[in-house]
Amino acid sequence: MSGEVVFLCPHALVSMNMITVIIASYRYGHLAAHCIESLLSQTILPSRILFVDDGGLDCSHLPSLYPDVEYIFRPINLGVVDNFHNMLSKVNTEYVLFIGADNWLRSDAIELLSNASTDIVTYDIVVTGELKEEILTRVPGETHPYKGDLYWDRQGQHHGSMMYRTDFGQKIGYKKRYEDGAHPQEDWNLWDKMLEQGATVASIKEGLLYYRRHKENFLKYSHASLRLQEQDLSYALEE
């Protein structure tokens, strides 16, 4: 992409698996270090960690703090679909996983995911953060209290940080699910199309993703579009 700044890590992360984790940020520079550290402290490291700031312009402090991560700083915001599609094209490992820079993984997540043999692997979610209680009205009956947070069972179900086989995903790519939709639902489209083409799915019954609900989820949208975004919060994991 013209004008984007790329920082390559000076030495490869040492690992025995073939998983790339892509951290996607837009105005999450104040939270991104937590996400990065959750990956660097994994019991088994991912093969690559790619960090993309999609025009938020608030992450320039990260390369000096975490030089083992590869960075792409976009001068303008591409939007979720084009950003994700472009980042997916940069992956050459067997599996890939996208995570929002405001979320984080449990310390043994990559180790558990490294045993994958299916095309897609899903896992459960721990909903946390200042606004975690909104999940109770969004998906009533689907969560239960868990160590002060809320546990969301996602067995055999889609979410934005599912891990999937890279070459399979690249054949489909990230696209809008519905052209007239309020939210692109690009990861839903990927899930649907992979299943249509016979993808195999496994689920890990562990809460491996900590999904942070916070004010910035809402503040980065204009007041005019906030109502539509609230209606589509079920697709917000990848933002």
Image: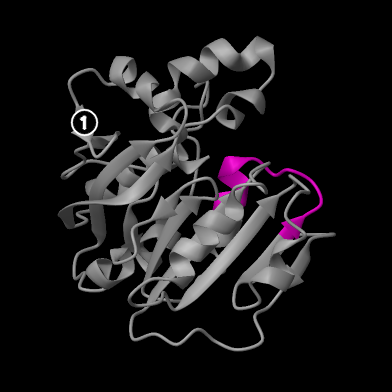
Q: Is residue 84 left or right of residue 129?
A: right
Q: Give the residues in magenta.
A: 73-85
Q: Is residue 161 left or right of residue 91?
A: left
Whether residue 79 appears in magenta in the rendering, the answer is yes
Disc 1 secondary structure class: strand
Where is residue 189? Give x, y as percent. Answer: 39, 40
Q: In this orientation, which residue lies closer to the viewer: 112 or 73? A: 112
- Can residue 190 be seen at all in this image of the molecule? no
**Which residue, given by chain and number where applicable, does mark 1 sit on?**
145
Whether residue 219 appears in magenta in the rendering, the answer is no
Residue found at x 67% / y 49%: 29
- Label 1 neighbourhood size at 10 Å, few (<14), some (14-19), many (20+)? few
Q: In this orientation, which residue lies closer to the viewer: 201 or 231? A: 231
Where is residue 3? Give x, y as percent. Answer: 85, 59
Q: Amino acid at mark 1?
A: Pro
Q: In this orientation, which residue lies closer to the viewer: 145 or 219? A: 145
